Image (spheres, grey):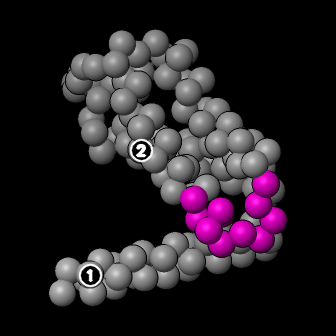
């Protein structure tokens, strides 16, 4: 029974990752921007959404974890459903995705904690 459930969960997760990957490839091919710009924007959007949902300061380094996690899942999807996967491409995708969130956290100078002050 447990094996059947785990298999179903695995198949469902792979199916969803396949749909996500197909949508990402479509957006990359038909969208108005290159994949580098898509990675830059995705990282920034995820980071801003994380800051808003968590209600922490902009400089809190823990706000970077969802960006890292989601980019890792994106690269896993690229690896599992390859179109033209390369290690160098994966490394550059990670750099492009993390660029603005990391730069902004470093410039804002977070200590890694604290709540944002509300007025």
Name the residue nearer the viewer: 109 or 72: 72
Residue 27 numbered mark, or none = none
Q: Which residue is mark 1?
A: 3
Q: Position of residue 11 (x, y in %)?
A: 42, 82
Q: Is residue 51 magenta?
A: no
Please give the name of the residue rendered at 23% of the width and 24% of the height, measured from the top-left corner.
115
Q: Position of residue 76 (x, y in %)?
A: 57, 59
Please report whichever mark, 2 or 1, sits nearer to the chain's N-terminal start: 1
Which quarter of the picture shows residue 60?
top left
Rendered view: 94 above or below 38 = above
Please give the name of the residue rendered at 38% of the width and 42% of the height, measured from the top-left corner.
50
Could you say whether the residue bearing mark 1 is in a helix, strand or loop?
Answer: helix
> Residue 40: in sight, yes or no?
no
Q: Is residue 107 left or right of residue 63?
A: right
Rendered view: 2 above or below 106 = below
Magenta span of residues: 76-86
Q: Is residue 4 left or right of residue 24?
A: left
Q: CA distance from mark 2 to mark 1?
A: 30 Å
| Quadrant position of the C terminus in the picture | top left
Could you say whether the residue bearing mark 2 is in a helix, strand or loop?
Answer: helix
Q: Is residue 78 magenta?
A: yes
Please give the name of the residue rendered at 64% of the width and 33% of the height, measured from the top-left corner.
99
| Quadrant position of the N terminus in the picture | bottom left
Please give the name of the residue rendered at 48% of the width and 76% of the height, measured from the top-left corner.
14
């Amino acid at each position: 029974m447990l094996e059947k459930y785990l298999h179903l969960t695995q198949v469902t997760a792979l199916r969803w990752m396949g749909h996500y990957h197909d949508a990402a490839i479509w957006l990359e091919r038909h969208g108005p921007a290159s994949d580098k710009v898509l990675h830059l924007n995705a990282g920034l959007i995820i980071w801003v959404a994380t800051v808003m949902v968590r209600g922490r300061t902009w400089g809190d380094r823990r706000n970077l974890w969802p960006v890292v996690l989601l980019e890792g899942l994106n690269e896993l999807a690229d690896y599992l459903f390859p179109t033209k996967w390369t290690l160098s491409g994966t490394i550059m995708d990670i750099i492009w995705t993390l660029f603005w969130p990391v730069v902004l956290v470093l410039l804002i100078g977070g200590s890694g904690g604290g709540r944002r002050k509300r007025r």
